Amino acid sequence: MKKAVCSLEQYFMLMDACMENIPDLIYNHMLLPKEVSGFIEEGKFYYEQYDGDGIIFLTDERDFYKLYCFVSESGNIEPAKLDKPQIIECIYSSRRSDEQIEKMKQKVWDMGFRLYVKNIRVRTSLDEVSECDACMGKMKNDLTWSYAVKEDLPDIYTLWSLLDRYNSILPKEEEALGMIQKGELICVKKHGTICAAARMKEENRKMASTWLLVVGQEFRHQGIATELYKLLLSIAKVKGYSRVMHWCDEKNNAIQNTTEKLGFQFDGLKSNSYILK
């Protein structure tokens, strides 16, 4: 049964006990205190404890639970049956063999999860990017852009419904409102209709990331995705970032071709997502 994690101190206590008692501990993601604090503040952080075999932390996302496993390689772990699918993500470098990740992949398979999608991380420098598009608010092809406001959310959620809900963490409305307050959501309009949207998030003082980027079906094959990417890079430059990164599906050749034309390059990081429905 999943139980709520109520404080950062409780998380540390659970982790200390886990690391002290399990010599063959393996994990898919080492959580940072800042991440944990954010999950707890949002009221979506839980755990399942397996006596002597480890612990699994869960975040309650919009359409699934995302799992962070700290478990014994030799232990027998059977994830609890929950009301939504469960996703485990393993991030690793393609440039070197990581024994820890390989053991975790096998454990994930043994727990009944199956590979769902492979993503690669691409990033680009903003040295040659112009700030003009972001400053003027106008784009090519009769497009205009603005930071999203609360009234835009229904149209943005309609666009987000086109995304793969197990490969894109869709925010709950209160989370989306928080993104609006931070100036993270951008929408693009054509003749007054919202045709595309994306989120830009700060990763650190030098790098931003793009998420939840989508173009409406009736507006595709018009170069709008390319213009949106250009806009995001311009906005990032205005905000003082020097790099932008983006995760994309390894099989999505269209997005990879678009980002490659704009200077994005694969940086060696890959992510395998496994699902248990």
Image (cartoon, grey):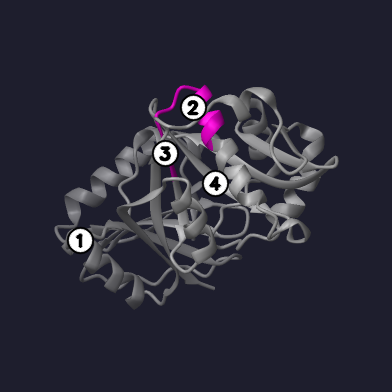
Q: Residue at x 38, y 28 (%)?
A: 206
Residue 181 horizontal/vertical position (percent): 66, 26
Q: Magenta residues, as a range?
A: 233-245
Disc 2 from disc 1: Cα separation: 37 Å
Disc 1 from disc 3: Cα separation: 22 Å
Q: Is residue 242 magenta?
A: yes
Which corner quadrant of the image does residue 131 belong to? top right
Residue 246 horizontal/vertical position (percent): 46, 47
Secondary structure at badge 3 equals helix
Q: In the rendered image, which residue does mark 1 sit on?
A: 100
Label pair 4/3, CB-CB below 8 angstroms: no
- Amino acid bearing label 1: Gln
Q: Is residue 101 shown to the viewer in this render?
A: yes
- Packing grade of label 2 (10 A; few <14, some 14-19, many >=20) is many
Above or below, 171 against 63 in this view is above
Nearer the observer, 150 or 247: 247
- Amino acid bearing label 3: Val
Secondary structure at badge 4 equals strand
Q: Given this view, does label 1 or label 3 mark the residue nearer the observer? A: 1
Q: In the rendered image, which residue does mark 4 sit on?
A: 211
Q: In the rendered image, which residue does mark 3 sit on?
A: 36
- Amino acid bearing label 2: Lys
